[in-house]
Amino acid sequence: MKNISKILFLLLLFASCKKDELKQNNDFPLEIPKGFPKPFIPENNQPTAERIEFGKKLFFDPILSRDSTISCSSCHFTDKKFTDGLAISIGIDNRLGIRNAPTLLNVAYLPTMFWDGGVPNLEQQVLAPIESHFEMDFNLPDVVKRLNTIEEYKTLSLKAYNQLPSIFSITRAIACFERTLYTGKSKYDDFTYYNNKNAFSDAELRGMELFFGEEGDCFHCHGTFLFTDNSFQNNGIYEFYSDSGRARITLNQDDVGLFKVPSLRNCEKTAPYMHDGSFETLEEVIEHYNSGGKNHPNQSSILRPLFLSQKDKSDLVAFLKTLTDEK
Amino acid sequence: MKKIKSLSTLLLAIVLFITSCKKEETAIESTKQVLGFHWHSMIGSEDASYGIQFTTNDGIKFKISDWRYYVSNFVLIKDDGTEYPITDKVFLIDIANEDYSLDSVPVGNYRGFKFTVGLDSATNHKDPTLNPASSPLALQSPSIHWSWNSGYIFMKIEGKYDSTVAQIGGASINQPFFFHVGTDNLKQVIDYSDEPFTVESGEDKMLHIEMDFLKILNSVDLKTENATHTGDNLPLATKISNNWKTAFTLE
């Protein structure tokens, strides 16, 4: 009898330990905007204050680049909605990259990373800019060695992941920090989720109707609370693509010139536009969609000449500017 | 009380069962021997090594600075024709190392074996950050993984060649070449299922495999076909992958 109680006691102890661990992780409050669902977070990387602190420090530290000159924040500025305002981003030794830096706001909701969707989650995404010759031109085992010479990083990693800085802890920490970045307090959200029906001007209201109607037809790809469906589309900006886009991953000719549909939230503040930053203004973007595209063989069948009036176009721009989060 | 008694009996039975299982396992272990490979990397008839000048069959002088590749999914073919797969064993072959231990396998006669150059799709796309640093599938320095499309480079060969007509070698070996060949479709099965061998009791078995770089270059003109990351030059990557099938020799 005594033995059995002992076993039972041990079992209970074990169970209670487990519960405690989960409780600590799941209860960390992420500031998710009103109306937004809870993002998927991997079981092995539930947010804690220690993990976010470790990741935030790494994000802003140029230590991740080979010559310690650039950090994640060199292409994802906090005051530029986590973009860099450049057509093509610039890495170490002033090396020109290949694409436009996307925003990191609401990145927790993305099912794939990068314009071509080549990486399935934030944790693995961390590897790419560190290893890219055009960006940080470094290497994960070497990053690990470097961080293990710094007491502060050793302490941060131990506290956050119960291990010294490792490829595991570095990639988890940065992803954990990035899952704290949201945008959802725009005039549009005020109108939609806070039910302030007087928030919009007539032009903005009309622009919204065009956006979500067949006339402007933006919503097929830029619907949902994220203003993207995260699909891959050839939006017809070229007859010939020097960047093969999604085909770089799939090696399928039908995917040449397809890029992931980006979110339009904060688009007023995230110029220039497209995977290569080739459009400088929202007016140019709308003019392009109005034209119906350049008819690449893979061009999305949704594109067609829209015959929008000048007022239609300016009302659409007015609506797009309601997606700006002034926070 | 009766319940408790039967419970204790059950516990005792379980403990006995586990111990007896273990004993049986040990019995099997003693009829197993380690199977390993001597993996020779060659440039034609010469041993491959880094930084040494070699010559292609077309007379082009070159040096290699990195030549590593993944082999996996070893399957032994037993004497009765059944397959004996060695799961979860991956080698990252580096020409600087020759000895690779596969596993403890049952002693006896085998009809042959086969393996894959590259990785199966599931292994290829697993999150590489989850591997312990000691694993061949951990991220390496220099890297042999594409972080932008989450897959491994199955074979990475880098070096420099002499692009001049004179082919005097030495300092004129200064033009880079690189073959980064990967993606699921380009893995190759190397089939030695009709190459019998015996694993004898009391003696570890070593199989000897040769891999010849000049055979990888079969019908590749190094002067014009010298760069591929697979996706950006799929015809060259495909040609190299096809050449793997004939680049190995079982000694």
Image (cartoon, coloured by chain):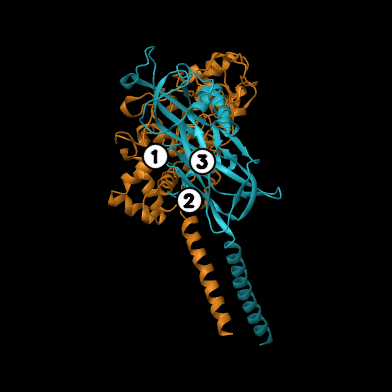
Chain colours: A orange, B cyan
Asked whether the residues under marks 1 and 2 belong to the same chain, the reply is no
- Taking the spot 34% from the left edge, 52% from the top edge, the residue there is A156
Judge whether A84 appears above or below B80 on screen: above
**Secondary structure type for disc 3:** loop
Asked whether the residues under marks 3 and 2 belong to the same chain, the reply is yes
Asked whether the residues under marks 1 and 3 belong to the same chain, the reply is no
Viewer-side label of 1, 3: 1
Q: Quadrant of residue A128?
A: top left
- Residue A179 in percent (x, y) is at 46, 44
Pointers 3 and 2 in contact (C-beta within 8 Å): no
Nearer the N terminus, badge 3 or badge 2?
2
Q: Amino acid at mark 2?
A: Asn
Q: What separation in Å lies between label 1 and label 2 (alpha carbons)? A: 25 Å
| Tag 2 subunit | A
Checking the image for residue A45, the label placed there is 2
Q: Which residue is the site of mark 3?
A: A121
Q: What separation in Å lies between label 3 and label 2 (alpha carbons)? A: 12 Å
Residue A304 located left or right of residue B181: right
- Residue B68 in percent (x, y) is at 46, 36
Q: Amino acid at mark 1?
A: Ser
Checking the image for residue B141, the label placed there is 1
Judge whether B191 appears above or below A220 on screen: below
Q: Quadrant of residue A96?
A: top left
Q: Amino acid at mark 3?
A: Asn
